[in-house]
Image (cartoon, rainbow, N blue to C red):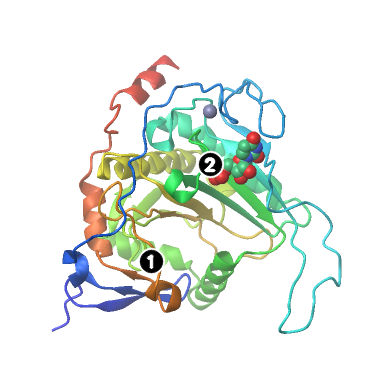
Amino acid sequence: MFDPKEHPHRRYNPLTREWVLVSPHRTRRPWQGQVEETPANARPAYDPGCYLCPGNSRAGGEENPEYTSTFVFPNGFAALLPGETAAGAAAADPFFQMEPVTGICRVICFSPRHDLTLAEMSVAEIRPVVDCWAEQTAELNSTPGIGYVQIFENRGEMMGCSNPHPHCQIWASSVVPNEVAKEDAAQAEYFHAHGRTLLSDYLERELEKGERVAAVNEGFAALVPFWAVWPYEVMIVSRRAVAGIDDLSGGERDSLAAILKTVTTRYDNLFRAPFPYSFGFHQRPAKGGEGWHLHGHFYPPLLRSAVVRKFLVGYEMLAMPQRDITAEWAAARLRELPETHYRNPGECRMRDAAR
Ligand code: H2U
Ligand code: ZN
């Protein structure tokens, strides 16, 4: 008898149309690999040496204003550069295809406070960040030459984050990038066939089942998707089928702020340490985008402690991604964690009260 809690199996991701191998029997395997140093977590509210703190100078010499909420600036080391995409510049040879890519890269500081993170900001402090994402999405989507607006946050040194000051990046490109193109095709096809978004139907089933739901509020749900690759991967999905962050109502923006706080707080509480991840939204491209349903992906590398991480290597590079703990087991662990941060349970509420 096949038991998915015990027996190796593969699961299908309908958004990317790829499979993931699940090996639940392997969680008893001994570990003798890398042990990473736990990052120190005491930081000052203002760091005179930080490129992102209010009033300081950035690497290119520009001075940050004395900002009090969010702050957006052009990335001084942008991977994409603005410009006209020269017509006919694409090379037609099938073996040597290339084409110019243009775009706009920006950085968004979440808060003037150097020592905060999304987990340690209050919901009222995260809400302006959501509004900023919505404004940036709307502005960049209507900028000529922009095809897709990717918002993402690298958190923690383990994920290559260059500065602990709470911030994220936007890369708005002339092209629709790979991961988004896969989800675009799958969502459009599903919508044509069923007249509903793929994620509305998936979310409805997950909310009925409950076993992979980590948190839910009025506007958003957080789940460990059935097809998760990373041990504690989480997907947040809007309960209403909206295509982009800029389509969210005021109430839904509050819900998004709240669920982001819940997920990041529980992440930190999992190993009682700052929890690294890459997070980002997937939303409709600037043009077309039929069947799109706004969602965010958290891809955290940690597996068994604050220092034991998962690598996507070997079989995963050459064949297919693989996980040991099941999505259901990870969701149950996240669900049972407290919603108050292990470091300062009362601090956000005190800041809110003082506002
Ligand atoms: P990451 O921590 O995810 O690397 O994001 C920080 C970004 O901020 C990074 O892309 C930019 C870097 O290029 N940056 C500036 O534009 N100016 C600075 O003075 C420091 C960092
Ligand atoms: Zn700072």
Please, what is the three-letter code of the amino acid marked with disc 2?
Ser
Numbered tag placed on residue 176 in the rendering: none
Is 251 situated left or right of 42 in this image? right
- Residue farthest top in this picture: 354
In the structure shown, which secondary structural element does the residue marked by tag 2 occupy? loop
Answer few, some or many: residues within 10 Å of disc 2's Cα (few below 14, many 20 plus, some between 14 and 19): few
Residue 208 placement (x, y as % from top left): 27, 62
- Please name the residue shown 47% across and 34% down the image: 126
Numbered tag placed on residue 202 in the rendering: 1
Which residue is more in the foreground, 284 or 269?
269
Residue 326 placement (x, y as % from top left): 25, 65
Residue 6 placement (x, y as % from top left): 16, 73
Is 287 situated left or right of 92 in this image? left
Please, what is the three-letter code of the amino acid marked with disc 1?
Tyr
- Please name the residue shown 80% across and 73% down the image: 90
Is 18 situated left or right of 22 in this image? right
First in residue order: circle 1 vs circle 2:
2
Viewport quadrant of the N terminus: bottom left
Spatial CA span between label 1 and label 2: 36 Å
Is 214 situated left or right of 178 in this image? left
Instruction: Give the residue pinned by disc 2.
Output: 162
